[in-house]
Amino acid sequence: MRLIMLGPPGAGKGTQAQRLVDRHKIVQLSTGDMLRAAVKAQTPVGRKAKDIMARGELVPDAIVVAIVADRISQPDAKKGFILDGFPRTVPQAEALDAMLAGKGLKLDAVIELKVDDGILLNRIEKRAGETHARGEPVRADDNPEALKRRLAGYYAQTAPLAAYYARKGRLSSIDGMASISQVAAEIDKILSKLAGRAKAARPRGRQAGTAAAKAKPRAQAGRKRKSAKSPAKSAVRSKKASSRRRPRTAARRKRPQRA
Ligand code: ADP
């Protein structure tokens, strides 16, 4: 399964992604986490990204695209992944499309979490407070000033991705202001609907070994063939058949009378 979590900072993408990782045994690829690790390790990428991130601005596309390309090629991403924080711009989305096409892979879904700005500010302040209380360093961009810039960047550069993926028929939007468990339930609903659709679209041969295919009685296959005919045509056919039958029935009825 290959998913994208889309939504403003503080929308709950990471929380939901973590739950899906545990459930579906796929990996969560958070560009924010990867970049923060690079900053901490003081790699060349980290040194370039450090100040940009602290201001709440976006790291250049080329850097992030290279990080993701490298990450999704690793063996643990083979079973699937959830991208959290990527893509964040239309050029990043186009680069991802090209990356996946080059590997013969496709995206299964893009899940957008919608949350009002006022709630985001509260959530970020709460996250910073909790991190501080645990004695851990607070994110350099978890402050009102940087958040304002992150939100402006989100609406200008990332929000258009919803339309981009809607056009491709991949987007599902959820109310991210509901409780964590309600949002999780909505995501599960979307994913099981997708799984059902994918199963129905699979060619019959590939389902042959499944329990469902084995349990399917022959009669059902017959019903399927019948329903494949155009209803209009079969209506004409049965009308013709009944008009052919009528004189014969009438003749049969007449015979005893003559006798
Ligand atoms: P948020 O919690 O705001 O969603 P993240 O943890 O995903 O933030 O990312 C933190 C910062 O890392 C961003 O503000 C940005 O500077 C940088 N960053 C993360 N992902 C990307 C990306 N795809 N493109 C550009 N910059 C990114």
Image (cartoon, rainbow, N blue to C red):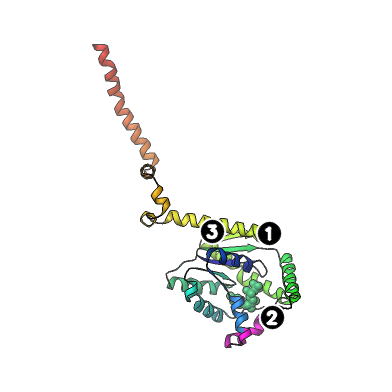
Q: Earlier in the sequence, mark 3 or mark 1?
A: 1
Q: Is residue 45 toward the left or the right of residue 257 in the image? A: right
Mark number, residue 159? none
Residue at 50% x, 79% y is 70
Q: Within 8 Å of ligand 1, the CB of disc 2?
A: yes
Q: Within 8 Å of ligand 1, the CB of disc 3?
A: no
Q: What residue type is labelled 1?
A: Ser
Q: Give the secondary structure at mark 3.
A: helix
Question: In the picture, residue 222 is in which quadrant?
Answer: top left
Q: Give the secondary structure at mark 2.
A: helix
Q: Which of marks 3 and 2 is nearer the N terminus?
A: 2
Q: Give the secondary structure at mark 1.
A: loop
Mark number, residue 191? 3
Q: Mark 2 points at which residue?
A: 55
Q: Is residue 118 toward the left or the right of residue 52 in the image? A: right
Inter-mark Cα distance, 3 to 2? 36 Å
Please state the quadrant of the image where ligand 1 appears: bottom right
Residue at 60% x, 60% y is 173
Percent position of residue 249, x then y = 30, 22
Q: What residue type is labelled 2?
A: Arg
**Disc number lying in front (1 or 2):** 1
Residue at 62% x, 69% y is 14
